[in-house]
Image (cartoon, rainbow, N blue to C red):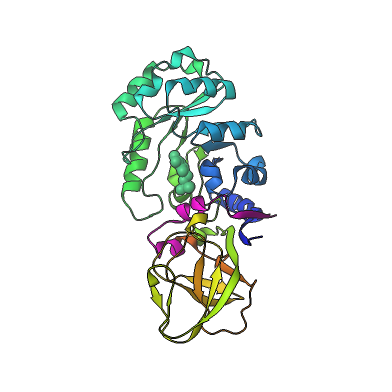
């Protein structure tokens, strides 16, 4: 059997939730979209459900799967994608966002009295969100009795960058627009939890911090290790080229190790060499990332054997700096790992 696995430390995910709680007294909505950022919705749910007030997903399919296992609120972050989705919102008692005026068209046909409606306000990101004038019109005419609760929300574009002035502008806009409105409010994702205490309001919405992809400087722990066993070692001569496009040529006689993982497993397709770890020593990948294989220069090391583990990243890797080596982000690294990779969970 192929030995290629993503290890996921559920204890570290719990620790990250507790670390978030050290930074805020707001209620916690766990963002578990995209299969809990690729780490598996059910497993993550079991690890943290007791300590959060609600969950957020994007698709109805995710919401249905989650409703099978929880009675807690489940928010559709983009609300409905077509009006008839409100019938599932009604049946499953889902919370939903309204970010566009069209999402009110035909809504009166449904009984949404068990749903919390989250009105999303445009404060500067210019993606989802009702423009101030639309929001105020809707807010005034909304029959609040028809919903379990009305919650006011927005989203920061640059929360990971403490020095970016747009954050204060967005926070000020949100405060100004919702000033004097008695409803509960929500603005902060992971970055804002650590960088902007005045953006916490009533409910915070951490995603990446739970999964350890960012904010290690705030005591967040990485939660994953990606590794694969060596399935071939071969001697090559100085001047020999390796793999597709013969993209790498040996400058001296050496050994090439091959592992069975590639972009078909969601590993990024990068051209530059990456550091990997074998028996606590660092080596470099060479040539192209293949669909099903990666080649490594073993630098003549005689101690490495077939079956040794190669760590592509580990429980000490800062995935933000790792992914920045190939112009990616930790979010993408985690959500891309495909179903072909075994996922094994540590408690
Ligand atoms: C994805 C998402 C979050 C979580 O963001 P992180 O940076 O992963 O903490 C919060 N709010 C909204 C609206 C989102 O789409």
Displayed quadrant of residue 228: bottom right
Task: Give the camera-side residue of 273 and 183.
Answer: 273
Give the farthest residue toward the right: 347
Would residue 117 be seen by someone viewing this image from the given angle?
yes
Residue 192, given in percent of the width and then of the height, sits at 44, 48
Does residue 160 appear to the left or right of 221 in the view shown? left
Residue 301 in magenta?
no
Displayed quadrant of residue 162: bottom left
Residue 233, given in percent of the width and then of the height, sits at 57, 76
Task: Give the camera-side residue of 305 and 325.
Answer: 305
* Looking at the image, residue 170 lies above or below residue 291: above
Give the farthest residue toward the left: 133
Residue 281, given in percent of the width and then of the height, sits at 57, 78
Q: Which residues are magenta?
A: 321-347
Does residue 76 appear to the left or right of 44 in the view shown? left
- What residue is at 52 percent from the left and 48 percent from the top? 37
Residue 343 in magenta?
yes
Task: Give the camera-side residue of 100 and 247.
Answer: 247
Q: Quadrant of the C terminus?
A: bottom right
- What residue is at 46 percent from the left and 20 percent from the top? 84
* Looking at the image, residue 133 lies above or below residue 166: above
- What residue is at 37 percent from the left and 60 percent from the top? 327
């Amino acid at each position: 059997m192929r030995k290629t696995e993503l290890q996921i430390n559920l204890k570290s995910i719990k620790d990250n939730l507790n670390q978030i709680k050290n930074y805020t007294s707001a209620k916690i909505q766990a963002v578990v979209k995209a299969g809990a950022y690729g780490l598996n919705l059910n497993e993550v749910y079991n690890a943290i459900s007791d300590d959060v007030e609600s969950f957020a997903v994007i698709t109805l399919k995710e919401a249905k799967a989650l409703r099978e296992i929880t009675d807690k609120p489940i928010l559709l972050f983009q609300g409905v994608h077509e009006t008839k989705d409100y019938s599932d919102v009604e049946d499953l008692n889902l919370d939903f966002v309204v970010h566009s005026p069209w999402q009110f068209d035909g809504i009166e046909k449904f009984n949404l009295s068990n749903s919390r409606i989250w009105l999303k306000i445009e404060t500067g990101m210019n993606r989802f969100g009702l423009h101030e004038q639309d929001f105020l019109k809707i807010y005034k005419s909304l029959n609040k009795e028809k919903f379990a609760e009305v919650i006011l929300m927005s989203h920061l574009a640059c929360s990971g960058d403490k020095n970016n002035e747009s954050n204060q502008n967005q926070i000020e806009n949100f405060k100004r627009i919702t000033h004097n409105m008695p409803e509960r409010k929500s603005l902060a994702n992971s970055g804002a939890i650590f960088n902007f205490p005045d953006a916490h309001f009533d409910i915070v919405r951490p995603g990446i911090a739970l999964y350890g992809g960012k904010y290690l400087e705030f005591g967040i722990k990485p939660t994953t290790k990606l590794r694969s066993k060596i399935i071939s070692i071969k001697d090559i001569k100085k001047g020999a080229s390796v793999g597709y496009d013969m993209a790498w040529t040996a400058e001296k006689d050496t050994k090439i190790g091959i592992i069975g993982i590639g972009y078909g497993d969601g590993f990024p397709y990068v051209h530059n060499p990456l550091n990997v770890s074998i028996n606590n020593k660092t080596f470099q990948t060479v040539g192209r990332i293949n669909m099903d294989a990666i080649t490594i220069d073993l630098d003549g090391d005689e101690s490495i054997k077939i079956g040794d583990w190669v760590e592509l990243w580990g429980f000490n890797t800062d995935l933000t700096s790792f992914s920045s080596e190939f112009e990616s982000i930790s979010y993408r690294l985690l959500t891309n790992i495909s179903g072909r990779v075994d996922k094994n969970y540590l408690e």
